[in-house]
Image (tube, grey):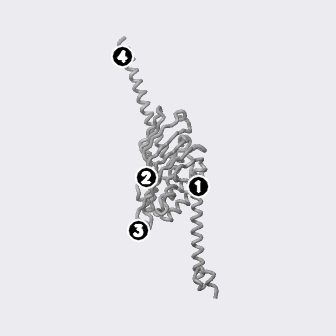
Amino acid sequence: MKTLLKILVAGVGVIVLVVVLLVVLGIRMIDRIAEEGIERGGERTLGVQVDAEGVDVGLFKGTFAMDGLTIDNPEGYSSSHFMRLPASSVEVDLSTARDDVIVVPELKIGMIDAYLDGTGGTPNYQAILANVKKDESGETPPAEPGKEGPKFVINSLVLDGATVKVTGFPGMKELTGDVTVDVSKIELKDVGSAEPLTTGELISLIVKTVLSTAVENGGGILPADLMNGLKGQLSELTGLDELGITAIGDVGKLGEDLQQKAEETLDEVKDEAEKKVKDTIGNLLGGGGDKDEDDDQP
């Protein structure tokens, strides 16, 4: 009888040990699955390698934490990365934690570190934003069934700010050297309210917001051709107003405001070109540019 009892106790112990090991293994697998989903989503949308670091999914607590997220440059650039998001953690609505759409009451992201790098011949942001445009227009191949991961609604997305370093642009080093644009705190309300966002779309939204605000704050700091290039590309992408998102901070409306600025810049260039043509014609005719009406009098 004692021998049978020992066997039963040992058997129960083995079962408990197996269950514990399966739970630990399952949690680790969930963390890895979440990490791979973030990386695949970001890479599909941005067209460059994305590395998620130290993902921890707290199933029973309704929490999610990540040690950082790095968006690499396209090949051929000297800076260490395109953009890096610091460690972040968030609580989710437990009632939605197992749904296809997860509701996040508030997500706070600390200071973001970004590089606008011209050492590759063309700015690093050009290829990345071109891929974002392809994804938004439906040109990017869809994700494999079952691998897109959940979609998100975030009631409040707070970016504490960003440091955008500008380096490697021809002529800039001789004139001003490398420069830095500081992006102030931004809060986005009702993210995903109109249409829940995939992980890739959420990362893309953060990229667009940081770059748009850098343009807003970069007057007199950023080279004119870089400013105009960024404005032009951002104006072709989906704006916050189209996504039903309200911005609190310096970002404004990504689409509408940047499109207006791009048009204003184009008008200024056009006016300047017309003036130069008139002056040139005047000189050729011996008149030498604009004259006052009094000069025509004898």
Q: In the drawing, what numbered circle is on residue 52?
A: none
Q: Secondary structure at mark 3?
A: helix
Residue at (57% x, 72% y) in the render? 272
Q: In the drawing, what numbered circle is on residue 255?
A: 1
Q: Nearer the viewer, residue 40 or 179?
A: 179
Q: Residues within 10 Å of mark 4 (few under 14, many from 20)?
A: few
Q: In the drawing, what numbered circle is on residue 174?
A: 3
Tell me residue 15's x, y (percent): 41, 24
Q: Disc 3 residue type?
A: Glu
Give the labeled residue for mark 2. 113
Dot 1 or dot 2, earlier in sequence: 2
The quadrant of the image that shows the N terminus is: top left
| Image side of residue 114 versus residue 245, left or right | left
The quadrant of the image that shows the C terminus is: bottom right
Q: Is residue 149 above or below residue 15?
A: below
Q: In the drawing, what numbered circle is on residue 6?
A: 4
Tell me residue 41's x, y (percent): 51, 46
**Could you tell me how far apart the alpha carbons at marks 1 and 3 are, in whole angstroms?**
33 Å
- Disc 1, disc 3: CB below 8 Å? no
Dot 3 or dot 2, earlier in sequence: 2
Tell me residue 75's x, y (percent): 45, 57
* Total numbered badges shown on the rendered structure: 4
Q: Nearer the viewer, residue 58 or 39?
A: 58
Dot 2 or dot 4, earlier in sequence: 4
Q: Disc 4 residue type?
A: Lys
Dot 1 or dot 4, earlier in sequence: 4
| Image side of residue 223 versus residue 135, left or right | left
Dot 1 or dot 3, earlier in sequence: 3
Dot 4 or dot 3, earlier in sequence: 4
**Could you tell me how far apart the alpha carbons at marks 3 and 2 are, in whole angstroms?**
24 Å
The reply to whether residue 43 is visible in this rendering is: no
